[in-house]
Image (spheres, helix red, strand yellow):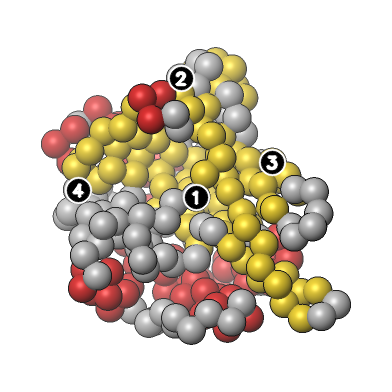
Amino acid sequence: MTTDRNIKCAPAATDGLGETLDREGWAVLPGLIDTAACDGLAALYDAPAGFRSHVHMARHGFGRGEYRYFAYPLPPLVEALRGMLYARLAPIANRWHERMGMAVRFPADHAEFLARCRDAGQRRPTPLLLQYGAGDYNCLHQDLYGEHVFPLQVAVLLSAPGEDFTGGEFVLTEQRPRMQSRVAVVPLAKGDAVVFAVNARPVRGSRGDYRVAMRHGVSAIGSGRRHTLGVIFHDAA
């Protein structure tokens, strides 16, 4: 599987990303990877030798559907995406932590951050492929996995809405202090990626910044099959 030539998001395409993430807690990167790469990644789901574990959501109360965590070494395209996106997001993550009064800062190089994870016992890779069929869904949740948590993650839709599946919208909720929760339904096309907060994000208030908690999930699939690539930047304990 090729790597860089399948990634269609040039550095300029992330201009304004920090502003959108500050405002909404999520942002879309249109056409992050091309159609061939989407199809190639989705096809990996049926090659279990490349994965470290297989999870059926219903067994754990996570919803319905299933996913597989990749094993190291990651497929070249997944490895390339993880490193490229981390480099774009690390400055935003550091700014968020500063605004939320959190002492942890993130290095510019993803390998250095993964070394920090390994030193804390977080050695299991977290990028994953998710597969949903008719009636499947993913409950609202957060992907934390251990002490070291990078505050942003990415999901890439590998299937075509209206062609490969119906329903199955990507959903985010934001729990604001002393207020009702806010919900966002993120429109995605095949190859689009959504960048979003893993756990908390800073919001500017009249008395300075405060934290809001965010969760994400997928609504019920009406028909067909939906595949997604999840790119999480911290590894699991």
First-in-chain label (2 vs 1): 2
The reply to whether callout 4 and callout 1 are in contact (CB within 8 Å) is: no
First-in-chain label (3 vs 2): 2
Q: Characterize the local packing of mark 2: few (<14), some (14-19) or many (20 or more) Cα atoms within 10 angstroms.
A: many
Label 4 and label 1: CA atoms lie apart by 21 Å
Q: Residue at x 28, y 43 (%)?
A: 69
Q: In the displayed structure, does residue 122 sit left or right of residue 59? A: left
- Secondary structure at badge 3 equals strand
**Quadrant in the picture for residue 15:** bottom right
Task: Check residue 185 in the rendering and tell me which mark sits there, or answer none.
Answer: 3
The reply to whether callout 3 and callout 4 are in contact (CB within 8 Å) is: no
Q: Nearer the viewer, residue 82 or 152?
A: 152
* Residue highlighted by disc 4: 71
Label 3 and label 4: CA atoms lie apart by 31 Å
Residue 3 visible in the shown view: no
Q: Residue at x 56, y 52 (%)?
A: 194
Label 2 and label 1: CA atoms lie apart by 22 Å
In the figure, 37 relative to 24: above or below?
A: above
The reply to whether callout 3 and callout 2 are in contact (CB within 8 Å) is: no
User: Quarter of the image containing the C terminus?
Assistant: bottom left
Label 3 and label 1: CA atoms lie apart by 17 Å
- Secondary structure at badge 4 equals loop
Task: Check residue 142 in the rendering and tell me which mark sits there, or answer none.
Answer: 1
Residue 51 visible in the shown view: yes
Q: Characterize the local packing of mark 4: few (<14), some (14-19) or many (20 or more) Cα atoms within 10 angstroms.
A: some
- Secondary structure at badge 1 equals loop
In the figure, 134 relative to 210: above or below?
A: above
Q: Amino acid at mark 3?
A: Val
Task: Check residue 133 in the rendering and tell me which mark sits there, or answer none.
Answer: 2
Q: Position of residue 120 (x, y in %)?
A: 24, 70
